[in-house]
Image (tube, helix red, strand yellow):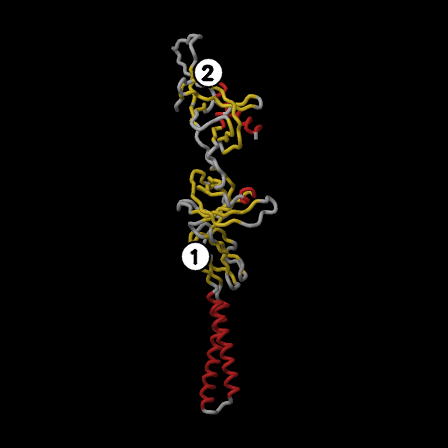
Amino acid sequence: MQSKLFRNLFIYHLLALPVLVSSCGEKKKNSNEEVVRPVKMITIEAASNIQDIKLPAVIQASSSADLTFKVSGQLVEFPVSSSQKVKKGDLIGKLDTRSYQNEVMSAQTDFDAAKQDFDRAVTLLAQDAIAKKVHDQREATLKVAKARLDNAKKSLEDTVLLAPFDGIISKKHVSKRDNVQALAKIATLQTIGNAEASVQVPASLVANSRNIETVESFVILDSSPDIKMPTKFVSASTEADPQTQTFKVTYAFSPPENIVILPGMTGSIEAKITDKNASTSSQISVPIAAISAEGEKTFVWIIQKDSMTATRREITVGESLGQEVLITSGLQVGETVAGAGGQYLHEGMKVSEFKN
């Protein structure tokens, strides 16, 4: 923790340049004149236990379906294209119907003949001119013919594939004129509007999930980095990935109408979380740029508001909270510190408040 903090401090202080005010015609100040250093002043407040997290996400449709024919045949109509929006009931594809129409005609002929024989048997049985066994045989033949006709008609209907819901064609798996088998994937249809983003969450967060409360969360697509879309928790896996030892968590979101969401798109989930059991009443934090280091010691510059002078004070740092660091000792709420540029201050130096 300390070595990481010192590296960050070095970077911040390297970038923090002194504020110099000069002009071409200005006269040099008298060397005895006291220098007043402009500094950004920060008033210490109680620290928040809200943490920012950012996790890579993979986008998926909230609902999708692989569209298939229930019968085999040659695909003679396939009027859709990838990324095309369709309405429920729109034609997705159609198979060659000639063999299925022939089967319906043949089954209809057999059914008509069986129906005629059965009707005659009913009449003769009423006249006691036919045995009951013959009547029953013709009735069974009629039932078989009816089942065959129903199946033939259903197969003919199944040569037409319609969209089961409003959506967008995310992928085509075959081409027109292909011979397709029953239940082979023809196209993938996904819902429009609601979508989902899945992330892999570290086991440490999952272990403490009962105490963690999400303040807010957004999904940001890599393809639209300037748009934040609010998310809502959907589900979490109960088994860790054997390779990464992380858990899959899924969030739902509704993208704007002008953004096309396709499965496999990448982005990130950004969230603010808080530990309900953590107490921050006695904790304070300061920006990392306000902390200076000397050897193994860390300190800040206290600004005495009454005299507008700087005084160095040693502090003890705790864990990092994003761009801030918890201070475990050395500061009190209400005190004022220099927000950056501590390397340009010295004990008792006069300062003025720098405002952007």
Left/right of residue 318 with respect to residue 27 in the rendered view: right
User: At which x and y percent is residue 146?
Assistant: 48, 75
Classify 110 as above or below 284. below
> Which kind of residue does numbered mark 1 sit on?
Phe
The N terminus lies in quadrant:
top right
Q: Which mark is residue 290?
A: none
> Which kind of residue does numbered mark 2 sit on?
Gly
Q: Secondary structure at mark 1?
A: loop
- What residue is shown at x 47% (from left), y 51% (from top)? 62
User: At which x and y percent is residue 100?
Assistant: 49, 68
- Total marks shown come to 2
Front-most of residues 270 and 168: 270
Residue underneath mark 1: 165
- What residue is shown at x 40% (from left), y 12% (from top)? 24
- What residue is shown at x 40% (from left), y 45% (from top)? 256
User: At which x and y percent is residue 75?
Assistant: 50, 60
Residue underneath mark 2: 348
User: At which x and y percent is residue 219?
Assistant: 46, 42
The C terminus lies in quadrant:
top left
- What residue is shown at x 53% (from left), y 31% (from top)? 318
Left/right of residue 87 with respect to residue 263 in the rendered view: left
Mark 2 nearby-residue class (10 Å; few <14, some 14–19, many ≥20): some
**Residue 222 in view, yes or no:** no
